[in-house]
Amino acid sequence: LKIAMDPDFRGTGESQQFWEEILNHWKIDSWSRIFLEVQESNLAAINFYKKVGFKELRHITRFYSNGDGAYTMQCELR
């Protein structure tokens, strides 16, 4: 599953509102944690995910088909 924000909406607060709502929904559904992978060079996304509660778990070298690495991130929902 991929989730992406249209560049025209970046910086408007829409992404943060989306993540807050979806994480709250998953809490209500008794999910305990969420994982995602983000490209290591995408510092804006990494910082955004940290802002909404994700923490870096590990670095994966050559995760993407173009050879780029990624970070696995986790958000605890308890």
Image: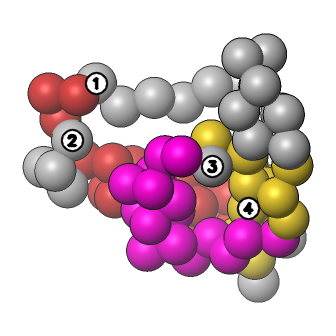
Residue 67 is covered by the magenta coloring: no
Q: Which residue is mark 3?
A: 40
- Residue at 75% x, 41% y: name it: 69
Q: Residue at x 86, y 49 (%)?
A: 60
Of the two numbered discs 3 and 4 in the rendering, the one whose residue sits closer to the viewer? 3
SS type, badge 4: strand
- Residue type beneath disc 4: Met
Image quadrant where one finds the N terminus:
top right
Q: CA distance from mark 1 to mark 2?
A: 7 Å
User: For the residue marked with disc 1, what is the amino acid?
Assistant: Asp
Amino acid under label 2?
Arg
Q: Residue at x 54, y 30 (%)?
A: 3
In primary-sequence order, the first of circles 2 and 3 is 2
C-beta proximity under 8 Å, tags 1 and 3? no
* Disc 2/disc 3 C-alpha distance (Å): 19 Å
Picture disc at residue 10: 2
Residue indicated by mark 4: 73
Q: Identify the residue shown where x is 49% and y is 46%.
A: 42
Q: Is residue 78 above or below residue 56?
A: below
Report x, y in % for residue 63. 83, 33
- Give whichever of 27, 20 is nearer the camera: 20
Q: Which residues are magenta?
A: 41-57
Task: Say which element carries label 2.
Answer: loop
- Secondary structure beneath dot 1 equals loop
Which-is-in-front pick, marks 2 and 3? 3
Residue that badge 1 annotates: 6
Q: CA distance from mark 1 to mark 4?
A: 22 Å
Q: Earlier in the sequence, mark 1 or mark 4?
A: 1
Q: Can I make out residue 38 in this image?
A: no
- Under mark 3, the amino acid is Glu
Give the CA distance from mark 1 to mark 3: 20 Å
Asked if 57 appears above or below 42 in the picture, the reply is below
